[in-house]
Image (cartoon, rainbow, N blue to C red):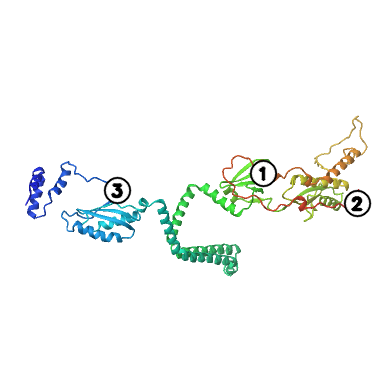
Amino acid sequence: MATFAHLRTALIFPWGGIVLAAMLTLELPIPSASAQEEIVAPILGQEAESPPSTPEETEGTVAEAEGPIAIEQVVTDDQIEEKLRGLLPRYPGVRSVEVSVDQGVVTLTGHVEDASVQDRVRDFVRRVEGVTLVLNQTKTDAQVLTAGQLLAKRLNRFGNLVAQTWLAFLAALVVLIGSVLVAKLFSGSSDRLLAPLFESVLLRSVIGSVLALGIVLIGFYAALEVMGVARAVLSVVGLAGAVALALSFAFRDFAENFIASLLLGVRQPFRVGDFVEVAGHAGVVRALTTRATILVTFEGHQVRIPNATVFKNVIINRTASNAVRQSFDVVIGYDASAVEAQRAIASSLIEHGGILDDPRPRTLVEALEPNGVRLRSTFWLPVRGVDGDKLLSDARLKAKVALQQAGITPTPTSVSLSLSDRIDVTLTSAEGQPVVEPLPHPRAATVSPDRARSNLELDTAVAQSSNVSNDSQADPIDQALHVAQDVVGDEQDNILTHDLRPQKSVDEAHPPKQKPQADRAS
């Protein structure tokens, strides 16, 4: 039978009478007055009173039951609470839990492991029959434990992980090392194994390198499978590869120069202090950054070459070896003895203190030209610790003095005139008188004999005293690095190391020669 509250609802809300009549006709359970007021109040614009919230509720989570909400409960609150009190403490990750149920609304308080356990517990409770709403106000370890307790928990978890996986890690390491060793053995014998299949040496080398790399990759994958992390690592590698591919298109030039700097840093075709020629530029290597290679010319100019350009072009390292060969040419007349000139030049070069004995200097006939016989003298000089330009100048001076002492002079320069008709030429003196005496030979000295003798003595004295070790001029390479040591603009650290190769001094590379007794006496 409808109560007075039911009749009041029907009178206040016109549709309420129709609903009440339908419920009486169908013999449906009639909600209580309080429930009806809660349903009707929002429709009438009235705000239903809500229970006061507590600070804990703001940090909790709420879950509603799926499907229709029953007006009259089939399962009582006590049954729900009793069931949850027996099940929730056994749930993995639940430290402690308190359950209270009021009209199908379950409130959970307590301590769980983390947020994932908190969500799973909420979903689990929502599935219990008779539960209409779940208020999960449990707290996680991060909210309850202190910093020391959290650290101890994580260390304990790490210790358990090590205790469970150390044997698998050792097995994976053995597999990886074994694959690397097998790849090295195969790479060493790949040329012999692939010779029956491929005739090209280059093709065998490339295929051998690819197969060796494949062996290493297979071993790496097998090691990951042994540890049980293959899928996770491969997914991360795939994602990293996709990101790297996208970035490589966006920063193509930067990525190209960076990769080139890594390859140059690993292979090291040059070091700091080497004199190199790259892409038409020559200078002393000062630094290699992730962006460019910095050279310093002998004139003191700084040159920055992008690393990609350096890597792609031909690199000439003129200081990679301990010695370098130099040469100069001399042209003598056909009436002079070429053999005597060769001996004179070779002996003068051998006496020089800065020229290496091994290999010995030599002078050969380079060409037969219309103006005379061209002789070319070659000799080897130390690369480090000497002024190459000064040493080459001294060698030329010694050769000039030796040729003069042997009575050999260079052939004069001649000019040939071709005339199409006969021309009468009359030679006259300064006084206008015709000259009938023969002209002097073109190679006649243009200075007095005394002056020529004095010049020869001076050149001889300087040539005999010339020595690289006595030269006060610094090594051009060291001088270039010294000039550029305070250059502004080095945006990054140097990838290369300084040249630590042993450098022989001039005296070590070529000890002073003892002159013959006859020369010392003279």
Tell me the distance, in whole angstroms, between the alpha carbons under discs 2 and 1. 45 Å
Across and down, in percent, residue 426 comes to 88, 35
Question: Which residue does the numbered mark 1 point to in the structure image?
Answer: 481
* Mark with earlier residue (2, 3): 3
* Mark with earlier residue (3, 1): 3
Residue type, mark 2 in image: Ala
Residue 410 seen in the figure:
no
Q: Specify whether 495 is left or right of 225.
A: right
Q: Residue at x 11, y 54 (%)?
A: 29
Residue type, mark 3 in image: Glu
Residue 100 seen in the figure:
yes
* Within-10-Å neighbours for mark 2: few <14, some 14–19, many 20+: few
| Residue 447 lies in quadrant | top right
Mark 1, secondary structure of its residue = helix
Question: Which residue does the numbered mark 2 point to in the structure image?
Answer: 518
The nearer-to-camera label among 3 and 1 is: 3
Across and down, in percent, residue 433 comes to 92, 31
Tell me the distance, in whole angstroms, between the alpha carbons under discs 3 and 1. 70 Å
Across and down, in percent, residue 405 comes to 88, 46
Mark 2, secondary structure of its residue = helix
Q: Residue at x 7, y 53 (%)?
A: 25
Residue type, mark 1 in image: Leu
Tell me the tag on residue 56. Answer: 3
